Image (tube, rainbow, N blue to C red):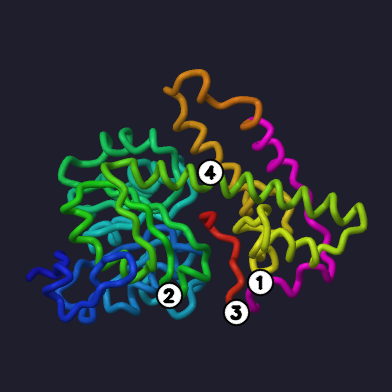
């Protein structure tokens, strides 16, 4: 079999089924050449997880190869070289403008005669953008939306969650890739289904992050013991992913900046709100949504203190700031 085609899971070797009902390859031969474009704090560990699983993987990023440590030898500086080498490309850049630059305008991955035959979009973008992206791609390119959740430590450990939208037969073929990087893989329907689930998930996550930060700031000002409050909330109706893992999330105390994780939160909320454009007025973006965006943009740093430092995971499993929000 040509090296540009994935073996089905039951042909590459013996397989076991993971908790998502997906077969896990134990042998990886005759596999696709996979590319990860956008090797930031999420893309790089995703590429490394694929490499550990035995896949032939190349990376592309605008930064020089020397910044990628042990993976430097697998980084390609020429976007056309990258586009010609890989048959499956993961796009893990920040937003829609960077996606368009990567695919058509600057790096032009799909502008030449040779290009990847499968594009997997793992960035968090508006679901309404995917039809436009589909129209601009060559007709023989398969488009899959596969945004992920779990933060950089989960990417390093191969325990991400993926939300998939696209043609079922295409996803069947690609499952060994997702299985190598993820612990939970959700197959949600046609193109756009994965992206819709991700922006709705992040809408809830962003709201919780704002509320927890405001509650902790107010409780501290009123003299509360934050460690005790955190214990109460974790065991009660105030439990949230953000609050439960506050000490383990290394961006949890940050203030807003356009280039940090709270800046990405703003982008994700706006991506979700854009998806609502065609809904009835009763479901359209409203004053609450505007206030939520403003609350993120005005988020001050949470002053360092001993409180909450012992909560959650140890330093080796801290959730890092990255391109995507868990």
Rounded to the nearest angstrom, the CA distance separating label 3 from label 2 is: 23 Å
For marks 2 and 4, the one nearer the N-term is 2
Residue 264 makes an appearance in the image: no
Element at label 3: helix
Looking at the rendered image, the quarter that the N terminus falls into is bottom left
Residue bearing the label numbered 1: 312
Q: Residue furthest front?
A: 236
Q: Is residue 179 magenta?
A: no
Q: Tell me where the magenta segment starts and ends, as one range.
A: 290-315
On screen, residue 177 versus residue 5, left or right, reads right
Residue bearing the label numbered 3: 316
Where's residue 131, x and y in %?
31, 34
Rounded to the nearest angstrom, the CA distance separating label 1 from label 4 is: 25 Å
Residue bearing the label numbered 4: 268
Q: Residues within 10 Å of mark 1 (few under 14, many from 20)?
A: some
Q: Nearer the viewer, mark 2 or mark 1?
A: 1
Residue in the picture at 11% in, 74% down: 11
Rounded to the nearest angstrom, the CA distance separating label 4 from label 3 is: 27 Å
On screen, residue 75 versus residue 309, left or right, reads left
Residue in the picture at 82% in, 68% down: 307
Element at label 4: helix
For marks 2 and 1, the one nearer the N-term is 2
Where's residue 90, x and y in %?
34, 57
On screen, residue 242 versus residue 177, left or right, reads right
For marks 3 and 2, the one nearer the N-term is 2
Element at label 2: helix
Residue bearing the label numbered 2: 72
């Amino acid at each position: 079999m040509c090296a540009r085609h994935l073996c089905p899971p039951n042909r590459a070797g013996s397989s076991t089924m993971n908790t998502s009902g997906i077969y896990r390859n134990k042998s990886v031969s005759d596999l696709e050449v996979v590319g990860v474009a956008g090797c930031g704090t999420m893309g790089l560990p995703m590429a490394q997880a694929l490499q550990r699983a035995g896949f032939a993987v190349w990376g592309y990023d605008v930064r020089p190869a020397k910044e990628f440590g042990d993976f430097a030898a697998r980084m390609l500086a020429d976007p056309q070289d990258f586009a010609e080498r890989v048959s499956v490309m993961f796009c893990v850049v920040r937003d829609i403008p960077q996606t368009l630059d990567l695919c058509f305008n600057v790096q032009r991955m799909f502008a030449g005669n040779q290009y990847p035959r499968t594009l997997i979009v793992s960035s968090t973008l508006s679901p309404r953008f995917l039809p436009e992206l589909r129209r601009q791609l060559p007709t023989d390119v398969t488009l899959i939306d596969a945004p992920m959740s779990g933060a950089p430590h989960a990417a390093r450990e191969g325990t991400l969650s993926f939300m998939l939208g696209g043609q079922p037969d295409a996803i069947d073929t690609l499952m060994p890739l997702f299985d190598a990087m993820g612990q939970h893989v959700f197959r949600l329907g046609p193109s756009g289904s994965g992206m819709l689930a991700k922006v709705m998930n992040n809408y809830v996550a962003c709201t919780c992050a704002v509320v927890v930060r405001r509650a902790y700031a107010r409780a501290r000002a009123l003299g509360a013991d934050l460690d005790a409050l955190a214990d109460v909330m974790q065991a009660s109706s105030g439990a949230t992913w953000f609050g439960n893992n506050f000490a383990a999330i290394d961006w949890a105390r940050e203030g807003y900046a356009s280039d940090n994780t709270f800046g990405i939160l703003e982008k994700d909320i706006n991506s979700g709100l854009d998806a609502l454009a065609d809904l009835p007025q009763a479901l359209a973006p409203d004053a609450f949504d505007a206030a939520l965006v403003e609350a993120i943009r005005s988020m001050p740093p949470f002053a360092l203190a001993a409180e909450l430092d012992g909560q959650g995971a140890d330093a080796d499993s801290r959730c890092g700031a990255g391109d995507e929000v868990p």
